[in-house]
């Protein structure tokens, strides 16, 4: 039984390492996809910026205001769309900056809290697992392996030595002195 548990422990640890090594790899793939969306949004906004340079001394806000103030409903909707595009381009650019410059922890938090659901789905759909050997991937993998092993031990119960420590605490021996254990 001890051999089987030891083998199971190693398998769970290895699976934890392999699964968690994929996190930085997925973040990189998401980051590349987000960068493409960001460039496309900026290119679209640049076309409106060119119109603003030609007619409003480069003031995009004046162009948006002119569109929005028009009595023609289609032109007013265009103004609102330009404003949405401006905001979206800024939001995507900020996400790209975070994913290119921050630590893995910050990237994962950003992705969980602010990740674009459509882009996350597309990234997952096309995701190809790999074995990245970057420091972030190795660290994340080792943390995942340890976590998986700890979860396994939690599911199988505490090891005997941990149980003894709990028994000492229950008896009130808080200074770490060992009292004889009765089995």
Image (spheres, rainbow, N blue to C red):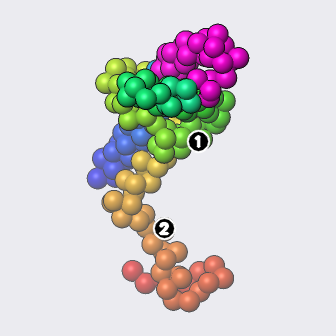
User: Quick one: SS at disc 2?
Assistant: helix
Q: Residue at x 51, y 15 (%)?
A: 44
Q: Residue at x 64, y 36 (%)?
A: 103
Q: Which is more N-terminal, label 1 or label 2? A: 1
Mark 2 vs 1: CB contact within 8 A: no
CA distance separating discs 2 and 1: 33 Å
The residue positioned farthest toward the bottom in the image shown:
172
| Magenta residue span | 36-63
Please tell me the numbered disc located at residue 105: 1
Please tell me which residue lies in front, 124 or 19: 124
Sort mark 2 into few (<14), some (14-19) or many (20+) by Cα contacts within 10 Å.
few
Main secondary structure of the magenta stretch: helix
Using the image, determine if residue 156 lies above or below residue 54.
below
Please tell me which residue lies in front, 130 or 95: 95
In this rendering, does residue 18 appear at all?
A: no
The residue positioned farthest toward the right in the image shown:
57
Please tell me which residue lies in front, 159 or 138: 138
Residue 51 sits inside the magenta stretch: yes
Q: Position of residue 12 (x, y in %)?
A: 37, 43
Q: Residue at x 48, y 67 (%)?
A: 161
Please tell me the numbered disc located at residue 161: 2
Using the image, determine if residue 16 lies above or below residue 181.
above
162 sits left or right of 90 in the view: left
In this rendering, does residue 160 appear at all?
A: yes
Q: Position of residue 69 (x, y in %)?
A: 51, 31
Please tell me the numbered disc located at residue 13: none
Q: Position of residue 136 (x, y in %)?
A: 59, 32
Q: Position of residue 128 (x, y in %)?
A: 37, 20
Residue 52 sits inside the magenta stretch: yes
Mark 2 or mark 1, whichever is nearer to me: 1
User: Quick one: SS at disc 1?
Assistant: helix
Using the image, determine if residue 28 lies above or below residue 108.
above
């Amino acid at each position: 039984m001890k051999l089987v548990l030891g083998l199971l422990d190693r398998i769970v640890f290895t699976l934890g390492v392999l699964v968690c090594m994929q996190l930085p790899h997925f973040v990189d793939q998401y980051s590349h996809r987000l960068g493409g969306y960001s460039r496309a949004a900026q290119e679209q906004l640049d076309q409106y910026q060119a119109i603003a340079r030609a007619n409003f001394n480069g003031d995009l806000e004046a162009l948006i205001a002119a569109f929005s103030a028009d009595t023609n409903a289609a032109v007013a909707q265009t103004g609102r769309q330009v404003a949405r595009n401006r905001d979206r381009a800024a939001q995507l650019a900020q996400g790209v900056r975070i994913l290119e410059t921050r630590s893995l922890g910050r990237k994962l938090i950003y992705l969980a809290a602010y990740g674009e659901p459509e882009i996350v789905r597309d990234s997952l759909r096309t995701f190809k697992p790999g074995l990245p050997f970057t420091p972030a991937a190795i660290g994340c993998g080792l943390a995942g392996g340890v976590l998986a092993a700890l979860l396994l031990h939690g599911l199988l119960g505490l090891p005997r030595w941990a149980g003894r420590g709990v028994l000492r605490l229950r008896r009130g021996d808080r200074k770490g002195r060992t009292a004889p254990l009765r089995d």
